[in-house]
Image (tube, helix red, strand yellow):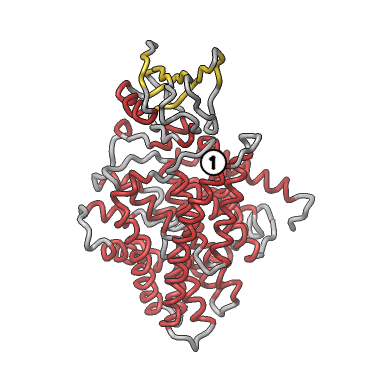
Amino acid sequence: MNLTIENILLVGSLLLFVSIIVGKTSYKFGVPTLLLFLAIGMLAGSDGIGGIHFDNPKVAQFIGIVSLNFILFSGGLDTNWNAVKPILKEGIALSTLGVLFTALSLGTFVWLVTDFTIYESMLLGSIVSSTDAAAVFSILRSKSLALKTNLRPTLELESGSNDPMAYVLTIAFLTLVVHQDQSFASIIPLFFQQMILGAIAGFGFGRLSKIIINRIKLDFEGLYPVLVIALMFITFATTDFVGGNGFLAIYICAVYLGNQELIHKKTILKMYDGLAWLMQIVLFLTLGLLVYPSEVFPYMGIGLLISVFLILVARPIGVFLSLIFFKMRLRRRFYISWVGLRGAVPIVFATYPLLAGIDKAHMIFNIVFFISVTSVLIQGTTLSVVAKWLHVALPEKAKPISEIDKLIIDLPKSSLQEFEISPDSKAVNKRIVDLNFPHSAFIIMIKRNEVYLRPGGSTIIEAQDLLMVLADKQEDFSSVAACLDNRITTLKV
C-alpha cells in the first residue's frame, strides 16, 4: 500500500495506537518497548502484513533528526546538574574518548573480517559507536531501575552527550570514503570545529533562551512549551549553519535550562516528556518501515559476529580505556560497559551513507540495523539482571526521587508557613521566578490588600504581601527565609 495524503493520518494514528497498547504490556514479558515499536513498523512495511511501501531514506533521516532533537532536549531538561557535576569528567571522557576507542576497535575488527576498506570499516564502527539516548532514557526509566552512587547519572549523561561525537566521526569517515584522496589528518579540524562551536552555541543559546522565556509575556500558559520548541530548533539549525554540532548544542542548552528557574517550568517539562515518547515511537516506526527484513537476513551472520564483538569487546575497550585515570570500582565499569545500548540513532546515522550513494551503503545499513536490534534485545532485557549480578542495584524502596520528579509529580508537602514581606525585603519588586526559591518549597497563595492571589512565575512580589508557603519539611523554611530576607509567621496546619 502506498501512503497518500488521504490515508497517511489514518495509518499513522493506527500504528501509533497499536504501538502504545502493545508497549503497555511489553515489559510483562521483558521485551523493551522500543523494540516493539520497531517490530510494528516492520510488520506494517512492504515485507510485512501491512504492505506499506516506504523507501525514502531522505524522509527517514529528516524524521530521525527532528525526533533526536526532541529526545536529546527532553533528556537534557531532565538532567540534574547537582547529580551530574560529581561525575562530569567521567561522563565527558565516556562520551568522547569512549566513543572514539569503540569506533576504532570495532572498525579494525570489521576491516579484518570483511572485505571493507579501512575507511568503510571505520565508518561502520563510527555509526554504532555511541550509546542511544532514546534507548537508555526510556529503558532505565521504564524499568525504574535504582542504581548505586552516581551510576545512573553517569549512564544518562553519557548517552545524552555522546551522539555528537559519533555524528562527527560518521561525517568525517564518510567524507574519507567519498573523497579517498583526502588524508585522515584533514578531518581533525572538522572535529574540533564541530565540538567547540557546538559547546559554545549550546551554552550561549541556553542563556539567551532563559532570558526570552522569562522576559516575554505570553497571554496563555500553553504557548510557553511552543516557545521552547521554537528556541530548540533555532539552536540546532543555527549551530549547524555556522558549522557546529547541533546535537551537542541542543543538549547543552537543555541541561542549562533544566537547571534554571523558568516561568511555567512544570508545564514545559511535562509536555517534553510526552513529546519525547511520541518522537521515540515515530522514529522507531519510521525506521521499521524503512527496513526490508528480506534484505537484512543475508547479513545476519556477519551482523551477529560484529554485534557480539561490539558488546563483549569494543564497548568494554572504549569504557575501560576512557576511564583508566578515574577511581571507580571494577563492577561499575563492567556495568557501564553492558549499558552500551544501540537503538535508533545508529540507524539514523546509517542513512547518511545511503544518501551519499557509496558502494556498500545498503550493506552497512542492514548490518547496523541488525546490530541495533540485537543490542536492545540482549542488553536491554538484561539491565536489571546484570545490575543485581554485579551488585550495583538498589532496592526499589531505596530509590532516591530526583528534583525533576518532585517538580512534576507534585509530591504532597507536610509543612505550611506564612512569610510577610517587609518594605526593606530584597524580594520586593521581584518576580517569583527571579527569587531563586528553594525547590523543596513553593508559594501557594499571596494575600495582598485583603485579596487572595494565585501566584505564577511572573508574579511580582510587593511590600506587605503575605506569602503562604508549602515545603517538604520544617527545616526547609530557613532557606525560604534566607531567600526572602524576611521575618516568618508560623501557621499551624
Does 343 appear above or below 105?
Answer: above
Q: Secondary structure at mark 1?
A: helix
Q: Furthest-top residue in view?
A: 492
The spot of residue 457 in percent (x, y) is 52, 33
Is residue 409 toward the left or the right of residue 70 in the image?
left
The spot of residue 26 in percent (x, y) is 49, 41
Q: Splitting the image into 4 quarters, where does residue 450 fall?
A: top right
Q: Splitting the image into 4 quarters, where does residue 122 fall?
A: bottom left
Is residue 87 toward the left or the right of residue 302 in the image?
left
Question: Mark 1 — residue?
Answer: 214
Q: Quadrant of the N terminus?
A: bottom right
415 or 426, nearer to the observer: 426
Disc 1 residue type (three-letter): Asn
Mark 1 burial class by Cα count in 10 Å: few <14, some 14-19, many 20+: some
Residue at 65 percent across and 62 percent down: it is 59
The spot of residue 353 in percent (x, y) is 55, 73
Q: Is residue 300 visible?
A: no
Does 69 appear above or below 143?
Answer: below
Residue at 38 percent across and 32 percent down: it is 438
Residue at 32 percent across and 49 percent down: it is 85
Q: Quadrant of the C terminus?
A: top left
